[in-house]
């Protein structure tokens, strides 16, 4: 059989990730087999193993598609205005994250990670959530530290506490919204919460 071109291989991998997203969302991760994912994609199980070692590897690749490192959101904001204060940059970066969350693929994959994934074989959803959360915390903390250096934070609020407050608020918002995304716009409600949080934190 002729070797696939890079473009064909990339298309096959994308088809498998799309199928995994749909089947994981419908059935949950533990109740989904690689055979079901392959069949949903119109491919063979051999195609799955060509691209992924196992279900855990496939799931990790799916989650990686929607990771939003806080620094990447900051970079996105900096491209539009390099003269922003640290607190304003945090506010706009959080708003940018909410815009991404309303994209259907982000919504489904994060819903799978938070609400449709159990401990299973080589999949540890809490470990994945902790890793993402810790990375975000460290990146956001560095910006709040800069805000403190510029005397923008309230005197009684440390950068660490400010970061914990913001991350806890956002985490609760994500969990509540993903249980029923049609109930309200996370961009609107979340935007109000972000803006109010920043106002309460600044001097």
Image (cartoon, grey):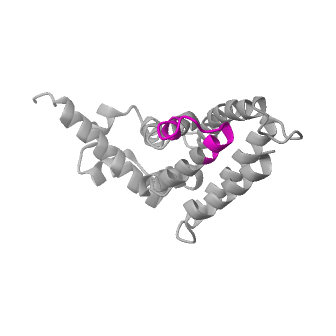
Nearer-the-camera pick, 133 or 94: 94
Q: Residue furthest bottom?
A: 183
Q: Would you say 14 lies left or right of 54 here? A: left
The location of residue 82, given as percent across then percent down, is 54, 34
Q: Is residue 117 visible?
A: no
Magenta stretch, residue numbers: 75-91
The location of residue 149, given as percent across then percent down, is 77, 29
Q: Residue furthest left?
A: 2
Q: Is residue 87 magenta?
A: yes
Q: Relative to 115, does residue 124 appear above or below in the rendering?
A: above
Nearer-the-camera pick, 187 or 59: 187
* Quadrant showing the N terminus: top left
Q: Which residue is at a point 70% across and 45% down the rendered structure image?
A: 167
Q: Is residue 166 visible?
A: yes
How many numbered discs sit on the rendered protein?
0
Q: Residue 133 sits in which quadrant?
A: top right
Q: Which residue is at a point 30% across and 43% down the rendered structure image?
A: 14
Q: Residue 136 sits in which quadrant?
A: top right
The location of residue 64, given as percent across then percent down, is 47, 38
Q: Would you say 87 lies left or right of 33 here? A: right
* Quadrant showing the C terminus: top right
């Amino acid at each position: 059989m002729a070797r696939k071109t890079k473009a064909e291989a990339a298309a096959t991998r994308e088809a498998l990730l799309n199928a995994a997203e749909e089947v994981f969302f419908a059935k949950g991760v533990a109740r989904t087999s690689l055979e079901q994912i392959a069949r949903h994609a119109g491919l063979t199980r051999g195609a799955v193993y060509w691209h992924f070692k196992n279900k855990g590897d496939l799931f990790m690749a799916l989650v990686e598609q929607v990771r939003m490192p806080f620094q990447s959101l900051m970079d996105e904001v900096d491209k539009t205005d390099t003269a922003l204060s640290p607190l304003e940059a945090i506010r706009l970066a959080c708003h940018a994250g909410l815009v991404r969350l309303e994209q259907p693929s982000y919504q489904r994959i994060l819903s799978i990670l938070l609400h449709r994934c159990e401990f299973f074989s080589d999949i540890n959803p809490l470990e994945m959530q902790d890793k993402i959360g810790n990375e975000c915390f460290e990146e956001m903390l560095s910006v709040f530290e800069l805000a403190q250096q510029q005397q923008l934070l309230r005197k009684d609020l440390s950068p660490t506490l400010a970061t914990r407050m913001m991350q806890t608020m956002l985490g609760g918002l994500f969990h509540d919204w993903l249980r029923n995304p049609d109930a309200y716009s996370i961009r609107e409600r979340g935007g109000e919460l972000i803006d109010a949080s920043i106002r309460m934190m600044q001097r």
